Structures are given as C-alpha cells and as structure tokens.
Amino acid sequence: MKEINKEDSNNLEEKKEEKEENLNEDKTVNVENEEKNSTQSPLPPPSYRNIETTKIVVEQADSISFEEKNNLLLESPPIIPSPFLRSPSPSPALLSSSSPFSFSSQNLSDNSSQMSFIIREKLHEFAKDLRRRTSAVREELCREPTPTDEQAEEDEDEDKDEKRRKSGERRPDQASLMSLIGLHQEVKSDEIVDVPSRLLPSNIDPFSKLYVSWLSFVLIAFLYNSFVIPLRCSYPYQTRSNLRYWLFGDYICDLIYLVDLTLIKSRLTFMRDGINVKSPPEMLHHYLTSGVFKLDLFSLLPLDILYIWTGPICAWRIFRLLKLPSFWEFFELLDSSFSNPYAIRIAKTFCYMIYIIHCNSCVYYVLSAWQGFGQIPYNYKGKWYLNKWVYNNEGNAYIRCFYFTAAVATSTGNNPAPTNVIEYIYMTFSWMMGVFVFALLLGQIRDIVSNANKNNEEFRTTMDRALSECKRLGLPEHLTARVRAWFLYTWEQQRTLEEKRLVEKLPLKLQTDLALSVHYNTLSKVKLFQDADRAFMRDLVLRLRPVIFLPGDIICRKGDVGKEMYIVNNGILEVVGGENNEIVFATLTEGSVFGEISLLAIGGNNRRTANIRSKGYSTLFVLSKEDLNDVIKDYPDAQQLLKKKARQMLRKDEKGKKGAEESKKNLIERCRVSCDLRTPRMLSAVAQLLPSKSKTVKQLLEQPEIKEEKEKKKYLKRWSTIPYEFSDASDIMEERKRRQPLSDRKEKIN
C-alpha cells in the first residue's frame, strides 16, 4: 500500500493538470449532459467504500472544511459541473493533504463527485425556496397595507436589525451565496475582528448642537491664529525659552483644523431639491466640490517646514487665517439658535473692532521699532528733536500701542503729530479706517440696539395712544386704569401685542403644528372632546384664541345665552352668587373647563347657570359656537359622537341633581320631629255625642291655638336650620297646659 501511495504522489501533479484540461474542454458538453441526466436517467445506487483518511478543504466556498476519518462515504455519479458555479469543484489548486499519506486518483474523483452532488441538491432547494419567497412577496405587495401594519413591520424590522447588530449576524439580503445554499461558513476564533463603535455618527446635521459645539473649538483655534500670528510677527513675545509653548499651541490648532477637514465637514448633510441628503459618498462629493474645501485645504498648507531654513518665523502660518468661513458660520448658527440674538450680533461686531485695532497696533509697534523707539533725533527747522510720535519702549508695549491706535481710530484728538512721510501715511490710513470702518461698525451696533427695542417702542406707542383716547373721551379714572393694567399684563406675558398676526405669516401646516403643541393637550382634557377624531381635533385647535381677563371681570353671567366654551390656561376663577356676588360657591383653576354643553345646545341647555368671576389676572382659551359649527360640518361622525356625549353628560347631571334633591329630602325627614298630639278619647266621645254642626265640635277639631303657635314659630325660628315642625321646650309647656282639665284652667284665669 505504501509503494502504491508513493507512485501516486509522484504522478499526482501530472494527472491533476490533465484532468483540469479535460474538464475545461468538456464544460459545455457537461452542461447539456446535466439536463439530460436529470430528466432521463436516474441516479445509480450508491456503493459503500471504506477509506482510511479523507480531508478536503474548499477555500473557495468561504473556507468550508469537509473532514471524515474512517467513515463510510456514498459513492455518487461522475462529476457534472454546475452552470451556476461555472467551474468544476474542487479544482486541483484547492486540494491539500494533512495526513502523511497521499490520495489516489480514484479517491479524488469520488470525493469530487460527492461535493458536486451535494452542491447540486442545495441549488435545487435554494431555487424552490426562492420561488416560495417570491410568491409570498407578490401576495404581500398585492395586499394594501394599513398604517398600523406598516408601523408594526417597521418596528419589528428595527428590532431584528438591532438584534443582528448585537449578535454580529447578517441580514437576509446581505447573506453570502454559500449561506443561502446551505453551506455555512465556519469562522475561526482567531479570525474574529472586533469592530469598535463609531465615535462619530455617519452624518451630522449642520444645525445640531453637536456641530455647533465643534465649531466653538474651531472658532477658538481660528481666533488664536488670527491674534497670535500678527502679535508674534511684530512684538518680541516669541523667544527661544518659550518657543516650545508657542509651537504646542500652533500644532494643537492645526490638529483641530485637520479633524474638521477630514472627519467633520465631510459628514455634513445638505439640501438638494428639497431633500436632506445623508449618503456618505454624496456628502463627501458635495464637500470636495465646494469652495469651503479649497479654503480649508489651503489653510493647512505645511509651510512650517520652512522653519528649517528660515527659523521660526510665524509669518509662514498666515494661511491659517483662511478658516474665516467657519467664524462666520458659527455666529450665523448662534444667531438662528437664540431667541434674543442681538447680544450675539453685538459680540460679532465687537470682535471685528478689536481685531482691526489689534492689527493696527502691531503695525504701529513695527514703525516705532524701525525708528528706534523715538531715540533717533530728527531735524526740524534747524533744530533737533526726539520723535514723540512713536512708542518710546516704556511700560507694557502692547497696551500702550493698543491705546494709541484706538485713540487714532476713534479720532479722540490730542495725539502727537507725525514727523515723516511714513508716519503721515499711517495716520491717514488710520483716520480713514476710523471714518469709514468704525462708522460702519458703530452704525451696525446702533441698528442692532434699535431692533432690540423695536417691539418695546411699538408697545409704548400703542399704549400711549390708547390712554390718550381714553382721556379724550372722558372715561372714568378706574376704567382708564384697567386699560393700562391690561396693556402692562399683556406685554409682560407675551412681549407683543400682535401675536396672532405674527403666527399668520407662517404656513398653514406650521400653524397647525404650533397649535397642536400648545393647545392639543389642553383641548383633549375636555370630556366632550375625548376620544374624538384626531383630524377633527387638529382643525379645532386652530380656532382656539387666548383671552386675558383682569381682576374682578365677570366672564359669564347667570341666564345669559352661552356662545363660547372656556378653558382656564392660568389664573383662578370663582363661581359666585348672591345679591352682590359675595358668596363663592366654587373655585376654578388651571385646566378647568366650563360652557362646553352650551356649544351644542342639547335639550335647550344654552343658558349660563352661574356667575363666574376672575379673581386675578387670568388667561383663558375661548372656542366659539360659530367656530365649532364651521369645523364640525366636515366631520359628521364627530358631530354624532359629540351629541351623544353631550346627552350622556346631561343625563349624568340630571341624575346628580335628582340624587341631591332626594338626599336633601331624606335629611329633612330624618331631622323632622312631629309635634302633633292626638285628640284625647274623651273629647272624641263628647264630639260624637254633640251635633256635628256644633261650634264646640268645630273648635275641638280645629285647635286654633296650636295653629297660631305654629305660625308664630315660623317667624321666630327663621335663623335656625332645624325644621319648623321641630318641638322645643315652649311647645312642650303649651301641650301640658292644654292637657289640664277645663276647671283648673278656669280657676287660674279667675
């Protein structure tokens, strides 16, 4: 056996090459034979052969290993290459042996036939499964989905994707070919790569807080370069001892520039044809083709390498100032983010002013150093003088030069006169800059301040006009004071008197969204509108309007026809009664609703049942009957639902009233004590003996004394809550007197 294996190993490579050539020549013939064999001749019965050691590793099929040792293998028909794979399997280049013995040519052919048979069967199963899936998808597309089904499917897909991401599995549409046909890949433990989570999202919204926060770092780096580069080029603040600190700050700013160029700007989303594009390739292409990319790229030119030949001259970093668009973008985002952007605009203008003075002070120091800091005398009309126009190198150089240039730019006067041509040119340029540039900046500041106070000025003008009209009409002082109080409270709460006009400038869809966010939760608390159609509620919230009531205002009076429904937004209302509304029956606070039944006028209930007064300043949302009818005509189902709920609420109120009346009657009955006394039997017997028309009988039956006492008690006990029929001590004494015999009473009278 060993001798045969040695001979086979010597001729193995030649046989492999011959077999590969034969298979390549018969590729087309085998495809036709496969179709004929699958339809005409069945597969021959398998035979069993004992193989000592077999190991086949198919690297092309995603490193799938097929190993058996001392097992029985099925001997299948000769290999038929699949037209789907387009290559015979396995090829000689993919065969390897791990045992000390080599394969024979017959064993190789049998194993190749076995693998071909398995792959062919798996392909048939894959085709059946694909047809089944196609039919299921076609049926699903034909069925019209409901919004709830779509939402459920989206949620289910998101949950499945999340589980796959956590487990590291692939989605079905991302599965490999070998996994689809049933040959799953075995991944070795040492080949598993742990992909770290991304520190940055794949796309960044240019209006998000994340991007604004990053721009703040870019702004700091830009301001550092803008102020430090002219400073180090002119003033002697860069020395050998502190050079490493300056270089450290320079390269930290360069790192920020580089991160902004490579990781941030290339991930910014953008609008195209009204659609927010979030595709990474498109975002990258949009950034690379923009002018901002060219400026960002030039701002990172590595001219610092010239330090090797020229020394650390900071002027080579002048291109870092090309990051100016990031400065503008940062302030624009802040301007649109804050509700009061005037402070941001003033800060931006102030930066311009300070930077111009800073650069001018650097030029002034260079001129002073060039002229020896005033130590070189000059001749004027035959006399020699020291130059007092330049900086004399005393005190803090930067502060003194900054003060001089600020005084020149603002034209405050009392400045030294220039002594030569260069000084005259510098002073002329500084004055021109002060006249035009600073005038422009100061005018911009004036506009910002005036716009900030524009609403306040309009409010004051409107209130003064209204108060003047009240005075012209001769209105009472207390009424004028109420007008003034309304203006002041409205301005304090809203900061505008034309809130509705401002909202009307927005699109209808945006108006609806604003109204929903403000009023929907409030309107949904009303029992009448609970469980109503959301579309109906969306149209209804647009009709709510806020109304402000002053302290003591009567919102509605008892008996008035109800045409509005009120919802308390803030403040306290009182349900009052009595002659002068001095009795407070109940208190209504935020969220309370009243007047909703009168909107539908079910059963003629359109009258107010109580007086409601505002205790302090109150803001109410009002819905009128006309607005409700205008909206509800388009929703017949909602109309029926509202009427049904209104009837239920009326029946519930009637039951409550009846229950209260019955409980009141029961309480009165329990508290009542009868004071009626039975007529004595003797008197009844006497009355029966006497004629029925006798006056004595009538007097005995009527008992006028008791009636008179009862009438007196009604007026005497008006203050008491005890029923009038309740007997007290005086009643008992009177009854005892009546029970006395007539003879005893006559004696007392005599």
Image: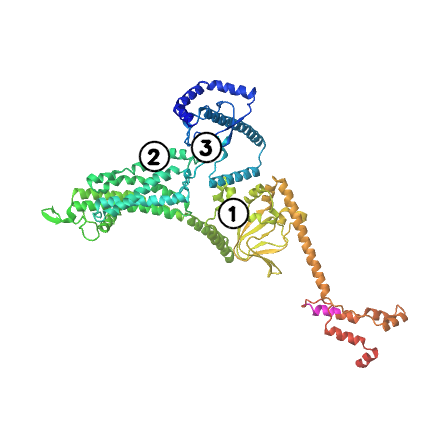
Q: Residues within 10 Å of mark 3 (few under 14, many from 20)?
A: some
Q: Nearer the viewer, mark 1 or mark 2?
A: 2
Q: CA distance from mark 2 to mark 3?
A: 55 Å
Magenta segment, prevailing SS (helix, strand or loop): helix
**First in sequence: mark 3 vs mark 1:** 3
Please provide percent x and percent y for residue 428. 22, 43
Residues at marks 2 and 3 touching, judged by CB atoms closer than 8 Å: no
Q: Magenta part of the protein: which range? A: 710-718
Check residue 291 in the rendering and tell me which mark sits there, or answer none.
2
Circle 1 sits in a helix, a strand or a loop, which is it?
helix
Relative to 24, say whether 610 is above or below.
below
Residue 340 falls within the magenta-colored stretch: no
Sequence-wise, the earlier of marks 1 and 2 is 2
Residue picked out by circle 3: 65
Q: Does residue 402 appear to the left or right of 656 in the view shown?
A: left
**In the image, is 62 to the left or to the right of 581?**
left
* Front position in the image: 410 or 665: 665
In x, y percent, where is residue 281? 40, 33
Which amino acid is tagged 2?
A: Gly
